[in-house]
Image (spheres, coloured by chain):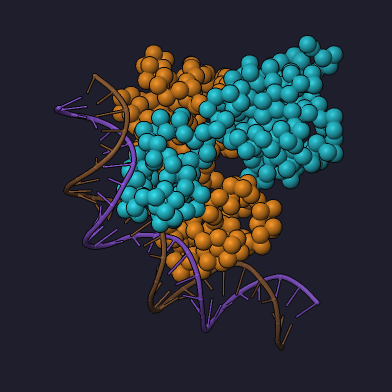
Chain colours: A orange, B cyan, C brown, D purple
Amino acid sequence: MLLPTPARILLIDDHRLFNDGLKLLLNEQPDLTVCGQVFRATDVVTAVNTLQPDLILLDVNLQGVNGIDLAKKISSAFQSIRIIMLTMYDQPKLLEETRKAGLHGYLLKDTTTPELLNAIRSVLQGKTSFDDAILTGRLSEDAFGDDFARRLNLTFREVEIIKLIIAGLTNEQIAEELGISVFTVKTHRKNIHFKLGITNVAELIQFAIKNGL
Amino acid sequence: MLLPTPARILLIDDHRLFNDGLKLLLNEQPDLTVCGQVFRATDVVTAVNTLQPDLILLDVNLQGVNGIDLAKKISSAFQSIRIIMLTMYDQPKLLEETRKAGLHGYLLKDTTTPELLNAIRSVLQGKTSFDDAILTGRLSEDAFGDDFARRLNLTFREVEIIKLIIAGLTNEQIAEELGISVFTVKTHRKNIHFKLGITNVAELIQFAIKNGL
DNA sequence: CGTACAATACCCCAATGTAGGTATTTTATG
DNA sequence: CATAAAATACCTACATTGGGGTATTGTACG
């Protein structure tokens, strides 16, 4: 399991506190060492060049810069470097893009530390690691909050669908995701609109934001 | 500056990695100690009760639960506990709510570690601490405008239209609001989609949120 | 055993959004 | 004044959503 010398990890994330915290976290591990931290997209290229990391933990969103595009560039220039995307949100689309781009992992920032370490070590060994929470149904259990649902008399299924709508999925994609008919999705959507007193997606998202997305 | 015994800090944030990282970060300081970590809103009350922290770092957004409401509850039940809100985004509204609620600080997660420590120590001494980045710069009026627009090469008009889309207006309503043709609105909308690399309203709003609505 | 509710599925049609064009006018700038 | 960028306007076509129905199934509860 342990490599002869600690694996060199580069952290790229504009949230400084998160970045700093992660550094401490990883440096506690004997087989891992953080060789550098980057906070801005513009600093990435030189950092990768000079630091020669084995693995990069990369935020999908660097103040408006698309992390996945960035990852692709790095990946094509340095094929040996392994890259794990870190993200705040579980967006199926980003997950898909990440896989298609041939990157090595996609993790949510609310994974636990052991899970992160696991993922890093797997990826260093040549495997890939995609967050279970995304693949399976973390969405279904909690996330959106009892509170919200209860106040507005939303059912479990409705909340589930709201989340997928907000994630940017179309009715058809939602239907596929949940394994139900598009008609059913539309029915739920109508009920949601009725319960919330709204008429379109934008208002739905407004609502979600106000009530704590 | 240093207290006789380390100040007890409770971390409330559902992003586990961030939470864990922060713990290490703070425990490195001789005058601070993390007395507990909470990952779910439902665990907050008992944690506060049993751990008796001096100060709480609280994420504004706990999987659907409004962090500010939570903070108010804590604050009214335990007046001596000082609370600093942590957030990913600079939302003027939340900042205002935080101040009105009589809480003691509001920090962005992309502040630096020294800034965080500074803020914590100030608050422990009875002062308040609101992130400069929020108070001064871009936020004040046009958070959305400048920065966001510049980064993404959006024009003034495009930003204007984005705001109206997010407000839930249809193309027709936007056209009327701005005194232009629906066709023009559609054109702008296409350009926006192109520049942002998105395909529908939900994604647009996602984008706006991430980049600081 | 009814009743209530959640979840499912379908139909129709209108309204709105998305995507590909092309093209003119205005404004800012070297 | 020439050029670029921004803002404007229109067209066609298709995709998706929105709102009005109706109806079946399973499950929980008194």
Looking at the picture, does residue B21 appear above or below residue B192? above
A90 with respect to B15 (left or right): left
Residue B60 position, x and y percent, is 65, 37
Residue drawn at 44 percent across, 55 percent down:
B173
The location of residue A53, given as percent across then percent down, is 42, 20
Residue A188 makes an appearance in the image: no
Residue B45 in the image: state x and y as whole percent: 79, 41
Residue A69: which quarter of the image? top left
Q: Is residue B110 or residue C17 the one in the foreground? A: C17
Q: What number of labels is visible?
A: 0
- Classify residue B165 as left or right of residue B40: left
Which quarter of the figure has residue B194?
top left
Judge by depth and name the residue closer to the eye, A3 or A87. A87
Seen at 45% across and 26% down, the residue is: A56
Q: Which of the two residues, B62 or A32, is positioned nearer the viewer here?
A: B62
Question: Image quadrant for the N terminus of chain B?
Answer: top right
Q: Is residue B75 left or right of residue A211?
A: right
Which residue is drawn at the image coordinates 37% and 30% (left, top)? A70
Q: Nearer the viewer, residue A71 or B140?
A: B140
Vertical comparison of B98 with C1: above or below: above
The residue drawn where x is 59% and y is 36% is B91
> Is residue B188 among what the camera can see?
yes
Q: Position of residue B59 (x, y in %)?
A: 66, 35
Q: Is residue A206 above or below residue B2?
A: below
